[in-house]
């Protein structure tokens, strides 16, 4: 039976920090060292949290710890709560409350600079911080940002999003390879060789290809930089959105139009909870800039 917190003493921040350390390390010893606590203290704190919630967060049945489904669901909520607490106590931000806008790659595409300039002109007292975070929700579910520019459908609970525009897909191939000189490519052209997939923050999976014509092999990476490096090194080709070609040029990578791939929606997402008071203004400005660009 789990050990519940003493009567009259609710869950405290230390319970959440202990759980997050265990969730990150998946090892009580390393989590204890990170928190500068003893192993028994971390174990008791974790058990107390589980007792309060009435669910098992960590599976201890094997030699290696693992988060349970409830633990996986709770991790993002705990991280958001801790991040909000730390943000509130950051004395350097008391006079100004920056609006943190996350993205995993390519930001707002061609509208990035117009958005940043227009925001600075209209809201000089509220800095807009553009943060690249290699995560499927660009740090949004973990409370690292207030809003995020995301690409493709995002299956994450507790988020609301609106589609701002749709980007076409392009192929990214080795600059001195046989596909680089082509005027355009089809998905089948890429399936003959390995395809590099960013499995952490990318939108491309093997499901982009028909079941009967999927790539012969795949190479998996965890961020945009490693994705570009792998393609430049000739380890495979890739698929991304058009703004990647502009915002992530690479001497070893050539971007070629892709004829038969569906577009990728670009979303502005936020948590479905009270947040930064300037979020409505950010959404309105983003819509305005996209509409303005569509008329030019």
Image (cartoon, grey):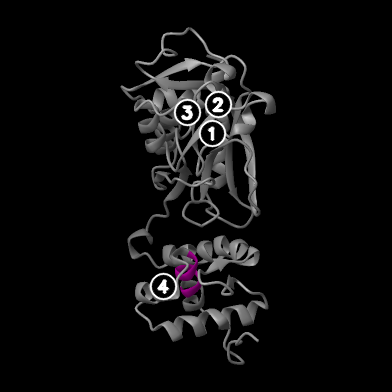
Estimate the spatial distance between the alpha carbons at disc 3 and disc 1, rounded to whole Å: 12 Å
Count the labels in the image. 4
Q: Do the residues labelled 2 and 3 touch (CB within 8 Å)?
A: no
Q: Which of 277 and 33 is in front in this view?
A: 33
Residue shown at 46%/8% (left/top)?
182
Q: Are marks 1 and 4 in contact (CB under 8 Å)?
A: no
Q: Is residue 282 above or below residue 85?
A: above
Magenta segment boundaries in residue numbering: 18-23
Residue shown at 45%/13% (left/top)?
179
Which label's residue is closer to the chain start, 3 or 4? 4
Q: Do we see residue 235 in this rendering?
A: yes
Within 10 Å of disc 1 (Cα), the crowding (few <14, some 14-19, many 20+) is: many
Residue picked out by circle 3? 109
Query: Which secondary structure, mark 4?
Result: helix
Estimate the spatial distance between the alpha carbons at disc 1 and disc 2, rounded to whole Å: 6 Å
Residue picked out by circle 1? 286
Q: In this view, does 220 lie above or below 62?
A: above
Q: Is residue 288 magenta?
A: no
Which label's residue is closer to the chain start, 2 or 3? 3
Which label's residue is closer to the chain start, 3 or 1? 3
Q: Locate residue 150, reporting x and y percent.
A: 55, 39
Q: Are marks 1 and 2 in contact (CB under 8 Å)?
A: yes
The mark lying in front, picked from 2 and 3, is 3
Residue picked out by circle 2? 290
Estimate the spatial distance between the alpha carbons at disc 1 and disc 4, rounded to whole Å: 41 Å
Residue picked out by circle 4? 31
Within 10 Å of disc 3 (Cα), the crowding (few <14, some 14-19, many 20+) is: some
The mark lying in front, picked from 3 and 1, is 3
Residue shown at 50%/44% (left/top)?
200
Residue shown at 45%/86% (left/top)?
40
């Amino acid at each position: 039976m789990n050990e519940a917190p003493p009567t009259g003493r609710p869950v405290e921040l230390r319970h959440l920090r202990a759980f997050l350390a265990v969730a990150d390390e998946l090892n009580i010893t390393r989590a204890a060292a990170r928190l500068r606590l003893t192993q028994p203290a971390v174990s008791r704190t974790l058990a107390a949290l589980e007792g309060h919630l009435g669910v098992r967060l960590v599976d201890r049945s094997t030699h290696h710890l693992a988060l349970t489904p409830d633990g996986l669901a709770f991790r993002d909520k705990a991280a958001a709560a801790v991040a909000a607490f730390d943000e509130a106590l950051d004395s350097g931000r008391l006079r100004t409350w920056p609006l943190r806008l996350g993205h995993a790659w390519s930001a707002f595409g061609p509208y990035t600079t117009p958005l940043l300039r227009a925001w600075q002109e209209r809201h000089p007292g509220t800095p807009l911080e553009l943060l690249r975070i290699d995560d499927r929700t660009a740090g949004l579910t973990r409370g690292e940002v207030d809003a995020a520019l995301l690409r493709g459908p995002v299956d994450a609970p507790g988020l609301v999003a609106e589609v701002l525009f749709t980007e076409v897909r392009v192929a990214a191939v080795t600059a001195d390879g046989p596909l680089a000189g082509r005027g355009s490519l089809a998905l089948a052209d890429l399936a003959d060789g390995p395809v590099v997939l960013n499995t952490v923050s990318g939108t491309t999976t093997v499901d982009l290809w028909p079941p009967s014509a999927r790539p012969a092999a795949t190479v998996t990476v965890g961020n945009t930089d490693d994705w570009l490096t792998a393609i430049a090194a000739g380890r495979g080709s890739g698929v991304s959105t058009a703004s990647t070609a502009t915002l992530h040029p690479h001497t070893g990578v050539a971007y070629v139009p892709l004829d038969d791939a569906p577009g990728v929606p670009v979303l502005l997402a936020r948590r479905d909870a009270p947040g930064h008071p300037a979020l409505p203004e950010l959404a309105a400005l983003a819509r305005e800039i996209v509409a303005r660009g569509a008329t030019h």
